[in-house]
Image (tube, rainbow, N blue to C red):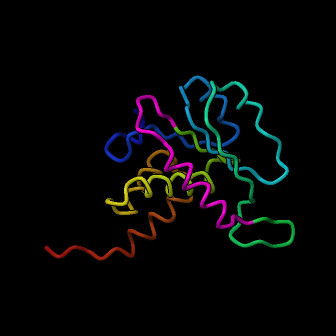
Amino acid sequence: MGLFSKRLVPFQVTICGIDELGFHCEAGVSHVLSILDPGWPEPEALGAFDPHRRLELRFHDVIDTGPGCIAPESLDVEQLLTFGRDLTEARGTHLLVHCHAGVSRSTAAATLILAQRRPDRPAEEALLAVVRQRPRSLAQSAHSRTRRRAPRASW
């Protein structure tokens, strides 16, 4: 089942960058979330995947819009969360989330989808699940900050 076991969500999640897409063509991916820069061509490797549902979002890897940079907007987040809600618990559901490097936008998106699917679990658990799969993710930084701020239990 992969690093996102049924303990957290009832479907498989893979996070990668564009250069890794070819490694997942035959992995039974049923859903693809593509986060690309505006104007970037569609990755050719996606043509080799079996038929799948796909959401394509286009914004730069920035927090704020600036000259030549388009930041994600609330509509992007709404579409992402709707796509995540529509994931089925049917056997064989496999979500692939990718951006350019598989480090920032894709890991943030996967964390949002996991946290949304399990509102009964602490957000840190979703962050940790992403960090386990993508150790070089920006979620790693967020997880580290959360751990430093978390109050220590007094036994």
Confirm whether residue 137 shows in the render: no
Magenta residue check for 78: yes
Q: Residue at x 73, y 27 (%)?
A: 47
Can you say which quadrant of the picture contains the C terminus? bottom left
Indicate left or right for 70 with 23 as reference.
right
Q: Residue at x 78, y 39 (%)?
A: 42
Can you say which quadrant of the picture contains the N terminus? top left
Place of residue 99 in the rendered image (x, y in percent of width and height, measured from the top left): 67, 48
Magenta residue check for 62: no
Q: Quadrant of residue 125?
A: bottom left
Q: Quadrant of residue 61?
A: bottom right
Indicate left or right for 36 with 15 as reference.
right
Q: Quadrant of residue 24?
A: top right
Place of residue 84 in the rendered image (x, y in percent of width and height, measured from the top left): 52, 49
Place of residue 122 in the rendered image (x, y in percent of width and height, measured from the top left): 34, 63
Q: Residue at x 70, y 32 (%)?
A: 46
Place of residue 109 in the rendered image (x, y in percent of width and height, measured from the top left): 57, 55
Magenta range is 71-94
